[in-house]
Image (cartoon, rainbow, N blue to C red):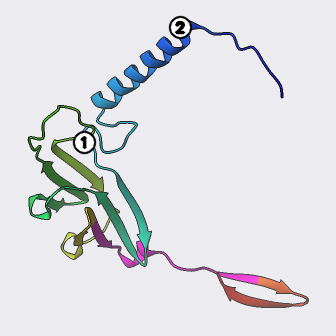
Amino acid sequence: MLNELVRWNPFDEELSSWHRDIDDLFGRFFGRSELRGIGGVPPMETYRKDGNYVVRVDLPGIDPKDLDVHVEGELLTIKAERKAEERGPEYRETYYGKFERTVTLPHGVKGEKITAHYEHGVLELVVPLPVELAGRKIPIQIEVGKTIESKAA
């Protein structure tokens, strides 16, 4: 077993605490936080699947009737409000209040074809992509001996 002396610096802990406070301040100012969802910004992910652009937003505790989802041009906006309930002590890590997220959609999508589904606190929006943006598989030519076989990726 190796025993090692480590020099203790009383300012390390204070400096570390100060650094966390500054990070928190910037996170609040710019609408983001180390812990996603705090400061009014619900966590979100976007990806492409089966010729669609999918937007998923975590909205636990929000009644889907209180959601406002609309599209204007290539901007998809999601708005809602999580209302606080009186519960006693004032310790909270959950954000209460209004929030708004706007996503820029790929060029050429048709807003009227977007579908929305809400289940278990997750809002999922499916945006059909135009054929030219949906992507396609590109066949790969593989050389085997002297003959060349074509195989789809």
Q: Nearer the viewer, residue 49 or 32?
A: 32
The residue that appears at 33% across and 37% down in the rendered structure is 32
* Left or right of 21, for residue 110: left
Q: Of marks 2 and 1, which one's residue comes earlier in the chain?
A: 2
The image quadrant where one finds the C terminus is bottom right
* Left or right of 2, for residue 79: left
Which quadrant would residue 149 be assigned to in this image?
Answer: bottom right
Give yes or no for residue 126 being in the magenta stretch. Answer: yes
Which residue reaches farthest right?
145
The image quadrant where one finds the N terminus is top right
The residue that appears at 83% across and 25% down in the rendered structure is 2
What's the residue type where badge 1 is placed?
Answer: Thr
The residue that appears at 44% across and 18% down in the rendered structure is 17
Which residue reaches farthest top?
10
What's the residue type where badge 2 is placed?
Answer: Phe
Give yes or no for residue 113 being in the magenta stretch. Answer: no
* Crowd tier of the residue under label 1, counting other residues whose Cα lies within 10 Å: few below 14, some 14–19, many 20 or above: few
Q: Is residue 21 above or below residue 81?
A: above
Q: CA distance from mark 2 to mark 1?
A: 31 Å
* Left or right of 153, for residue 30: left
Q: Which mark is residue 11?
A: 2
Q: Position of residue 64 (x, y in %)?
A: 14, 63
Q: Nearer the viewer, residue 120 or 39?
A: 120
Q: Position of residue 71 (x, y in %)?
A: 18, 61
The magenta span reads 124-141
The reply to whether discs 2 and 1 touch (Cβ–Cβ < 8 Å) is no
Question: Regarding mark 1 in the picture, which secondary structure is present there?
Answer: loop
Question: Regarding mark 2 in the picture, which secondary structure is present there?
Answer: helix
Q: Which residue is mark 1?
A: 94
Q: Position of residue 102 (x, y in %)?
A: 25, 51
Q: Position of residue 16 (x, y in %)?
A: 49, 18
